[in-house]
Amino acid sequence: MSQIIEITVSPKGETTLQTKGFTGESCRQASRQLEAALGLRLTERLTSECHSAVEYQSTVRQ
């Protein structure tokens, strides 16, 4: 599976960042600079597969 970082911006300006195809902590390493650029993290939701390979999602607000 390829590695993807998907950023969605709501009409209110809130952003959701979701990584796919990363294993373990590599998702956080890959998205760290993007999260910092987007602003303050309001929530973080890790999937049950977080420790193995699948997805990481974080919502940030500018």
Image (cartoon, rainbow, N blue to C red):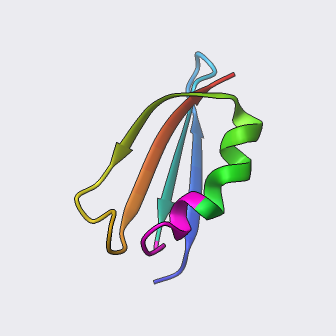
Q: Is residue 12 shown above or below 8?
A: above
Decide whether the magenta segment is chiefly helix, strand or loop: loop
**Whole-percent x, y for residue 46 in the image:** 34, 50
Front position in the image: 52 or 19: 52
Q: Is residue 36 shown above or below 6?
A: above
**Whole-percent x, y for residue 58 in the image:** 48, 41
**Whole-percent x, y for residue 15 in the image:** 58, 32
Name the quadrant containing residue 40: top right
Asked if the magenta segment contains residue 22, the reply would be yes
Q: Which residue sits furthest bottom? A: 1
Front position in the image: 31 or 11: 31
Front position in the image: 15 or 10: 15
Q: Is residue 32 shown above or below 38?
A: below
Residue drawn at x 53%, y 81% is: 2
Residue drawn at x 37%, y 74% is: 53
Q: Quadrant of the N terminus?
A: bottom left
Q: Which residues are magenta?
A: 21-28
**Whole-percent x, y for residue 50 in the image:** 33, 62
Q: Which residue sits furthest left? A: 48
Residue drawn at x 35%, y 42% is: 45
Asked if the magenta segment contains residue 52, the reply would be no
Q: Quadrant of the C terminus?
A: top right
